[in-house]
Amino acid sequence: IIIISMKSKRITIICGHYGSGKTTFSINYALYLRNQTSKDIYIADLDVVNPYFRSREHFDYLKDKNIKVIGSYLPQSGADLPAVSAEVYTLFDNKNIIGIVDMGGNSAGSLSFATFRDNVDIEETDIIFILNANREENSTLEFALGHFNSIESTLGLKITGIVNNTHLMNDTTIEDINKGELISSELSKEKNIPVKFTCINMDFFDNNPNIKTKYDLFLIGYDIKTVTNII
């Protein structure tokens, strides 16, 4: 995984519309950070709404990479119960931990964060909105802005950055990337916050090494929809 340029805060909260790629980004970002620091890295999976493609489904793989997943369920019960673990508090209280919070989709998926809102130190926290312009709900500035404002209101915190995640893994085209960067740029101007970078699949980058993008690149090497992944 390669990031061409990025400064990270201790806590990163990942939000966005359903299907925008929040979990894919969260896991790949954790893997990137694992190569940058020896500190403990935790992913808190707060998705109690969507039963598919959650961080906790990749528990064993991440454990092998020395990344801990805190799931919104009770593993000792043998069931996947819709409850947020109190262990999430550890991310905010233990300053030696690097934490990533993988939210559920839309404003409904952000409701579970209310319990932890007062524990957030804004100075050490980035709140990132994942934008995928290939999703109808993010396909125009108006649509994206509506979801952005709704999520921000539910969180009770200001979103601090945007990630353009408009790609189709191996089926990505230059047009996909350009479309996403255009809407991300418009949303950035509207909300006066930066676009952190553009995500693209690593194989696409290997086939297009001279690609020119408006924003720095984050390469996605782990596809959560693929059973076997090699980084």
Image (tube, grey):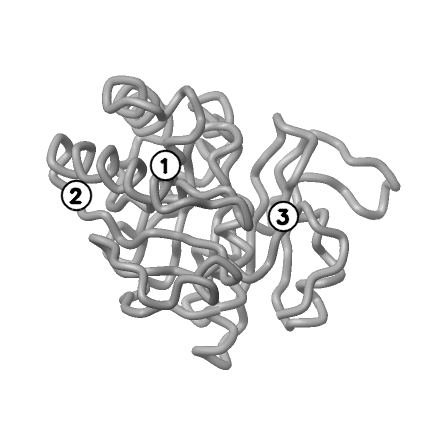
Looking at the picture, tell me which residue is in the foreground, 39 or 55. 55
Secondary structure under badge 3?
A: helix
How much space separates mark 2 and mark 1, taking CA atoms? 14 Å
Looking at marks 3 and 1 on the same chain, the residue that comes earlier in the sequence is marked by: 3
Looking at marks 2 and 3 on the same chain, the residue that comes earlier in the sequence is marked by: 3
- On the picture, is 192 further left or further right than 52? left
Location of residue 192 in the rendering, given as x and y in whole percent from the top left corner: 11, 39
Q: Amino acid at mark 3?
A: Ser
Looking at the picture, tell me which residue is in the foreground, 7 or 210. 210
Few, some or many C-alpha atoms within 10 Å of disc 3 (few <14, some 14-19, many ≥20)?
many
Above or below, comparing residue 113 to residue 23 in the picture: above
Looking at marks 2 and 1 on the same chain, the residue that comes earlier in the sequence is marked by: 1
Secondary structure under badge 1?
A: strand
Q: Amino acid at mark 2?
A: Ile
Few, some or many C-alpha atoms within 10 Å of disc 2 (few <14, some 14-19, many ≥20)?
some
Q: Residue at x 69, y 30 (%)?
A: 51
Above or below, comparing residue 79 to residue 174 in the picture: above
- On the picture, is 195 further left or further right than 88? left
Secondary structure under badge 2?
A: loop
Location of residue 69 in the rendering, given as x and y in whole percent from the top left corner: 64, 56
Q: Residue at x 15, y 33 (%)?
A: 191
Say which quarter of the image contains residue 116: top left
Location of residue 101 in the rendering, given as x and y in whole percent from the top left corner: 48, 48
Which circle, 2 or 1, is nearer the viewer? 1
- The residue at the far right in this view is 78
Few, some or many C-alpha atoms within 10 Å of disc 1 (few <14, some 14-19, many ≥20)?
many
Q: Which residue is mark 2?
A: 193
Looking at the picture, tell me which residue is in the foreground, 41 or 21. 21
Q: Which residue is mark 3?
A: 55
Q: Residue at x 40, y 35 (%)?
A: 132
Query: Which labelled disc corresponds to residue 131?
Result: 1
